[in-house]
Amino acid sequence: MTESGETLMRTPLHEAHLQVGAKMIPFAGFEMPVQYRGVLEEHRSVRRAAGLFDISHMGEFEVEGPGATEFLQRLVTNNVKKLEVGNVLYSVMCREDGGIVDDLTIYRLGRERYMTVVNAANIEKDWEWMATRNEVDCTFRNISEETALIAPQGPAAEKILAELISGGGDLESISYYAAAEREVAGRKVLVSRTGYTGEDGFELYLAAEDAPYVWNSLLLTGAEHGLIPCGLGARDTLRTEMKFSLYGNDIDEKTNPLEAGLGWVVKFKVGDFIGYKRLAEIRELGIDRKLVGFELVDRGIPRRGARILIDGKSAGVVTSGTMSPTLGKAIGIGYVPISHAGEGSGFEVDIRGKLRAAMVVNTPFVRKKSA
Amino acid sequence: MEYPQGLKFSREHEWVKVEGNTALVGITDHAQSELGDVVYVELPEVGAELEANSIFGVVESVKAVSDLFAPVTGMVTEVNQQLSDEPELVNSDPFEDGWMLRIEMSDISEIDALLGPEDYKAYIEEEDV
């Protein structure tokens, strides 16, 4: 129960987490593991070997039937028409005013068959948004509750997962941002080479009832390769090091993709999508603020909501921040005026009333070899 | 959970070791366990004057920021500089190497207001923190 008495939802792996003494917290209406052994150890495990994440709280919608492509294309800013069957697309969904409704991934499973994966906190909102705009009347189903999502991430992830592939097909042929059906520990799984950590890794979509068996099989097989279960704490430090946006922190309905560094998922050529007109205008006029990555020069850790000051005046805001486990430095993400968005630009962050110097740096903060 | 004898405890989960007219201060095993991995500690300068129950610094984990409260009134005579580079000492050795500062007490009777190990243990269990 939360403090307010509302009942939290649980993932199919809830028991498994309790059994190993995970620290559970409320998140997006779910009871989720924030850590098992400790955020730092889990973070390092993903960077050096492998970590296993239960992200079953996320939402999945099935979109199918004539007009499915048209339906999705109207809703998202990236090019769905060009997405090949078996591939995955990252995009944002915008409002008419260019504000971001959610960021999501889109899996093309057939010519007119898709799965969209949305943030847990936005499942209801996105459902409403999309269902009420289903003018082509394609089949649109919320399969979130029956779908579990497990993510093995790290340089050893492929090796570990490969040991559990039964039936036909390999993992090597699943390239970055592609997905295919495989049998993992005898269970049917949609395997994609995607993730939120910056490491090589996979996201496994499977039936909720198969989740505990596959989770335990992965941990057993992965143990000798250094695989440990990882919680939301490490998920956050890993994605922050890569400057991957977190909806609700770095992007929300008051931010547009152009200022958030997501211009690359806005394909104006595609034609009309919701928000096109406003985004085209912004592109024309230029953005006046930008989401940048920065490092603290003085001591301290920048946190979400902290004010950014330039020449003593409020000029921006921190949207995410942490002590980077990999770098041993305090890093942050935030909006600054375009004049101060260049690498090396300096500003101050108000941390509990004290002004601490910070400097814009190139991102991702942690350099990885491309997958 | 460790509850060393000979220490006094505050309700804000600091421990105090009285040595002469000074108080060596740190946070308890319970506190570090609740916090998780400590990544940053901010302490006052030597010479700073502290009032009992006022905030003298901060200890941060990856996700949480926790204020540190002075258990007694007095002047800071020593600060554990090691915590700048090795904040994790607070987790690994909260009662020894993870010490935070030494205060020269201006009113030693303030110690009486602190809890003994048994009372602190009961306090934690009652609080269900």
Image: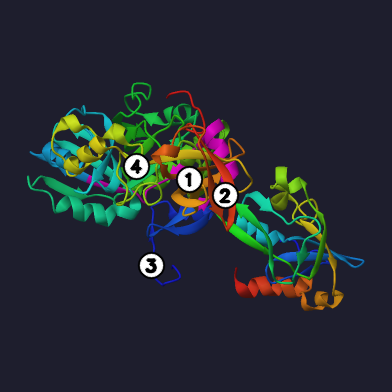
Does the residue at mark 3 contact the one at mark 4 (Cβ under 8 Å)? no
Is A117 magenta? The answer is no
Q: Nearer the viewer, residue A367 or A331?
A: A331
Mark 3 and mark 1, same subunit? yes
Which chain does tag 2 point to? B
Residue drawn at x 13%, y 39% is A68
Badge 2 marks a residue whose secondary structure is loop
Q: Is the residue A234 above or below the residue B107 in the image?
A: above
**Picture disc at residue B27:** none
Seen from the viewer's position, the closer of residues B21 and B49 is: B49
Please give the residue where the numbered disc 3 appears in the rendered image.
A7
Which chain letter goes with mark 3?
A
**Residue tagged by mark 4?**
A288
Circles 2, 1 touching at the beta carbon (< 8 Å): yes
User: Which amino acid, by three-letter code, is at mark 2?
Assistant: Val
Instruction: Name the residue rendered at 35%, 26% in the picture.
Output: A176
Q: Which mark is residue A236?
A: 1
Which is more N-terminal, label 1 or label 3?
A: 3
**Dot 4 alpha-carbon crowd within 10 angstroms: few under 14, some 14 to 19, many 20 or more:** few
Horizontally, is A162 left or right of B20 in the view? Answer: left
Q: Which label number is shown at residue B62? A: 2
Apparent side of residue A157 relative to residue A109 in the rendered image (left or right): right
